[in-house]
Image (spheres, rainbow, N blue to C red):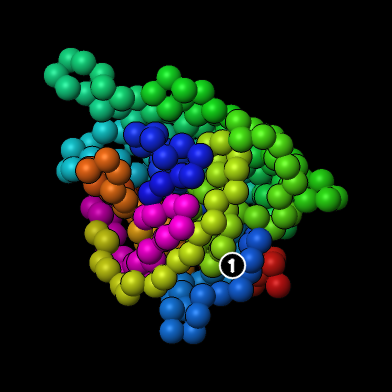
Amino acid sequence: MTDRHTSNSKLHTLAAAGLVAALCSAPAAANEAPMIDTTANPASEFLAGETLAFKVMRDGSQIGHHKIRLEEVGDELHVEVDIELEVNLAFITLFRYEHTNKEIWRDGRLVSLETRTNDDGSEYWVSATSTPEGLSVEGSAGSFIAPAEILPTSYWNPATVEQNVLLDTQRGGLLTVSARAKGSEVIETAEQIVDARRFKLDGDLKADLWYAPDGEWMKIAFDVRGSTIDYVPVGPHPGLRTAHQSSQR
């Protein structure tokens, strides 16, 4: 997974995961159509207070965690992302990464975003607010107006695989992406077995994403600097529930 602004960042891929309406809402080509329910309103029929939790693995060894908490507050969906990573050699810390992200959604659209990132000592931030003109974004990459329907790179929303452009949650820039369906794979945890759909992201982000048939985010994996980063879901992932209706259509 690469970012055109920070191609030398050791683990910048995780900032984009900080692991989540559509600027280009057209689905993938017919022979690559997602076999998951991406039409659900993520603010409907979901279990308040649920958390999606992952162990973050580097070449088979755990280096940290990625947690996403979803909570319904009135007519809004509040999403809080917490990522903490640390690579050590004996008692020496070689790399540290911390990312927090708070999203507020209303009627299926992102209305507020606040993120802070410590990428091994380099600080980044993003602040975005819905306006009549679109999503007003300020951050380390500058200021601009993004389309009102844009999705951030937090991946919990299964409509991520339908997008051509995503909002970078580390710096605030726009990332060009495409997704191809790669079939089904079984993902197993202590609590559940899921026949998840796999999608390959290309463009400014290069990674593989897995979603359950009803849209729950199950996994991400990518290669960086000769290492494989792989997410392992912890516990059941009940944060999203299929609403069978779209706030986007």
Residue 248 lies in quadrant: bottom right
Residue 209: quadrant of the picture: bottom left
Q: Residue 76, can we see it?
A: no
Magenta residue span: 189-207
Give the residue type at disc 1: Ala
Residue situated in front as seen by the camera: 217 or 127: 127
Task: Decide if residue 113 is in sight here.
Answer: yes
197 part of magenta stretch:
yes
**Residue 97, relative to residue 32: is it above or below?**
above
**Relative horizontal placement of residue 148, taking residue 196 as reference (left or right):** right
Q: Residue furthest top?
A: 91
Residue 89 picture location, percent across and down: 17, 22
Q: Residue 182, relative to residue 238: is it above or below?
A: below
Q: Is residue 181 above or below residue 140?
A: below
Q: Residue at x 66, y 44 (%)?
A: 104
Which secondary structure class fits the magenta region best?
strand
Question: Which residue in the protein does label 1 denote?
Answer: 40
Q: Position of residue 20 (x, y in %)?
A: 53, 51
Q: Nearer the viewer, residue 111 or 41?
A: 111
